[in-house]
Image: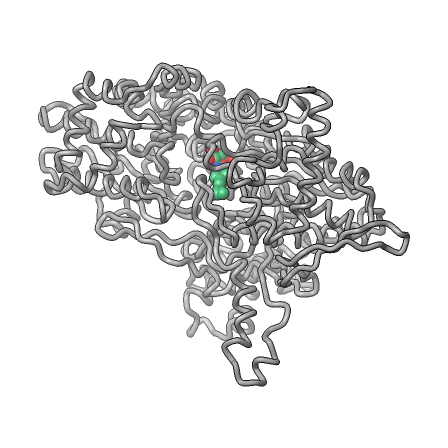
Amino acid sequence: NKSCHNVRTDCTAPGLRQAVLDNLYYVSGNTPVTASAQDWYDAVAYCVRDRMLKAWNEGIERITKALDLRAVAYLSAEFLIGPQLGSNVLALGIAEPLREALATLGQDLDAIVDGEHEPGLGNGGLGRLAACYMDSMATLGVPAIGYGIHYEFGMFTQTIRDGWQVEMADKWLRQGFPWEIVQHEFAVEVGLGGSTETFLDAGGRLRVRWNPEKRILAVPHDIPVIGYGGTFCNVLRLWSAEAVDAFDFGSFSSGDYGKAVEEKILSETISKVLYPNDEPYQGKVLRLGQQYFFVSASLRDMLRVQQMLGKPLDTFHTTFAIQLNDTHPAVAVAELMRLLVDGHGMEWERAWAVTTKCFSYTNHTLLPEALEKWPVELFGGLLPRHLEIIYEINRRFLEEVRAAYPGDEGLAARLSLIDEASPRSVRMAHLAVVGSHAVNGVAALHTELLKTHVMQDFAALTPQKFCNVTNGVTPRRFLALCNPRLAACITSRIGPAWINRFEEEIGKLEAFADDPGFQAQWRGIKRENKAALSALAEKHLGVALNPDAVFDVQVKRVHEYKRQHLNILRVIALYSAIKRDPGAEFSPLAVLFGGKAAPGYFMAKRVIKLIHNVAQVINGDPDVGGRLTVAYIPNFNVRVGQVVYPAADISQQISLAGKEASGTGNMKFGINGAVTMGTLDGANVEMRQCVGEENFFLFGLTAPEVVEVKRNGYDPRAYAATDPVLGQALDMIASGAFSAGDREIFRPIVDNLLYQDEYMVLADFASYMHCQALVMEACRDTARFTRMSILNVARLGKFSSDRSIRDYCRDIWNITPELG
Ligand code: 26W
């Protein structure tokens, strides 16, 4: 109806055109003549955001009005949401009219979408998982709020200088972020430090009061998360820290301007920067401050909703199911107890019942060095009241343990929330388990290992708490959006329902696995995607990648347990084989790497340097003649991933069995038609079950074999001595073949492999090389390999995050999705 044409809601091409022009003029102060690329982006982003606001406002009302509704509160220190414009356009279904509208203005929608600088508010898997789950909850109609931190600096930008990683600050807000709405009226104060005191309340009861030394203002920044179809919208609420008072007028008036703003600066450091270390955690007080800051603000926000609904506090768990994404927000258990007991005078037992019914905890790692433990002294200095509460939770918990297992003091010590070894410390995973009604691992193998190793005592004590929810990824961003060619091809055969019913629909593709016409189309698309990635590599790296080569890719954080060095040893062995017999047949292979190393991770940074040096030698060797190419894609992030996954033929998932909790990159590659070369680790195990063993390239020790070999005394040198291919690859590195004769630069890597090799690279090498030969053979048989690729997509329906969210709803949250 043209008469009620509305510039903020109209989704026709002319309406969108007018909206963009209006924004350009009234929001950015520009005309099409003066507008920069950023101005066009902003104008389009605000135009798209306007069209989300109906669903957005209905979403807010839903949570704050419905008395009988249980919402998920997803607590996560990281949300790696990726670029927003493209995914929101997809969800609203306005790509075509918007493209047309922009074309009439001489603008290209794809170029504008590609120009977005993503908010890097996460390290890797855990943060991206949180974002996929937000997408699935909105798509399935699960009312949810994501609570996290509005870091001023996200994940660093990785640049490469002379083969070394160099970190640069990521000031992602420099150009503004059109998707967020600041909600000052919902700001809350958060205390830190100070001491506690007891007092008698009006009813004559002994109560405790915390007198924090300082207070910080937590200000919510809301980002809408709209589901596919555009009708259901949730919110991601990220807290940023501000000084309670802008500055100290006392100091200001007396002329000490520096001191006047000091407090402001100190307060704001809380949300200043994302810690870029995943895994080995560092006991830094600022990190604990960040965790408590966002947890406290979030719980107070939830209690505000509870009170606004007029519901009594002892029904709080009927309003919110609170999910702890790893232990980073685990202090929430103590904070909710404090708010209920100290703040509202609730009896301990009642408060504890409410608390445990609210919380559930997802564990994301088996690595012992990643389990968070805070020295008691540090913890008590920052959160004195919470330490007392944790002691009380522990006292009551150990009383139950001792009643159930009298005389077993070893068991009590192992289960205790406090590690008595010096320095005494708070075990955050134990706090999370005791304070939750459900604990889950992120893949079947991972959950099994949790129950039998890392948490075996807890599993024996409360077996009913433990369950598995295998991770998933959103097929919207990681197929429909990032691989439009393949998406259109799939839709042309099975219709579009796979986009929000992936698990149910994608299997229909299997019928076309051997259809020659479909196969040719499939290969053509892969080739176009490879050409697109090649163009980027050419532009940014000056490396020529042959789109007819097999693209073999490993992109993920750089970690010894993920074994990028196993991959590069394989590359060196292939190179040696070519050098030995340059005339032998060798089908073109491009081996691509990408990923960031934690800035303080010595070995990981040296592995990055090694890969670069190997690349330089191989790519420049005329004997190789371009048949083997190695490239390192810098600054791997969500945006880069969206170009890389669609272009891969082979996905490298080669962690030592028992170390990778799940992996999610494996799934992103798989649903884009890459065939996995991998170990029986994390979700690889289940992916292989789904695609069939003949469509998966397996190698390496199994988790029980790893334990067995280590028990018998693992000696990496024995492998180097008996396998000439391995011995030679190591010798080449050691002798300086990739470092212009410098024998020192990579000595730490070679020595570590020969004398320690904690992640058993040498033990798995021969099996990996054997597997490589099978891969090359399979790739030569085009029809067979295309069939493998199609079947990988068709049979990975289970790995949609929609399935994961349904699992959480049914097994943990007791919530029924409103859609689908
Ligand atoms: C305390 C420092 C720290 C920071 C982040 C420790 C641990 C983390 C994360 C748990 C690391 C992470 O991202 N883990 C990954 O989580 C993914 C989602 O479940 C899994 O797929 C990966 O296997 C797991 O390594």
The part of the image, by quadrant, that contains residue 608 is top left
Q: Residue furthest right?
A: 203
Colour mode of the rendering:
one colour
Residue name at image x 63 percent, y 30 percent:
439
Left or right, 382 with respect to 345, comes to left
Q: Nearer the viewer, residue 790 or 395?
A: 395
Residue 506 on image: x %, y %: 52, 28
Q: Nearer the viewer, residue 590 or 435?
A: 435
Residue 767 on image: x %, y %: 30, 18
Looking at the image, can residue 694 be seen? no
Looking at the image, can residue 811 be seen? yes
56 over 646 or under it: above or below: below
646 over 569 or under it: above or below: below
Q: Residue furthest bottom?
A: 254
Residue name at image x 31 percent, y 53 percent:
166
702 over 69 or under it: above or below: above
Left or right, 421 with respect to 353, comes to left
Residue 82 on image: x %, y %: 48, 49
Quarter of the image with the C terminus is top right
The part of the image, by quadrant, that contains residue 666 is top left
Residue 751 on image: x %, y %: 23, 32
Left or right, 782 with respect to 481, comes to left
Q: How many marks?
A: 0
Quarter of the image with the N terminus is bottom right
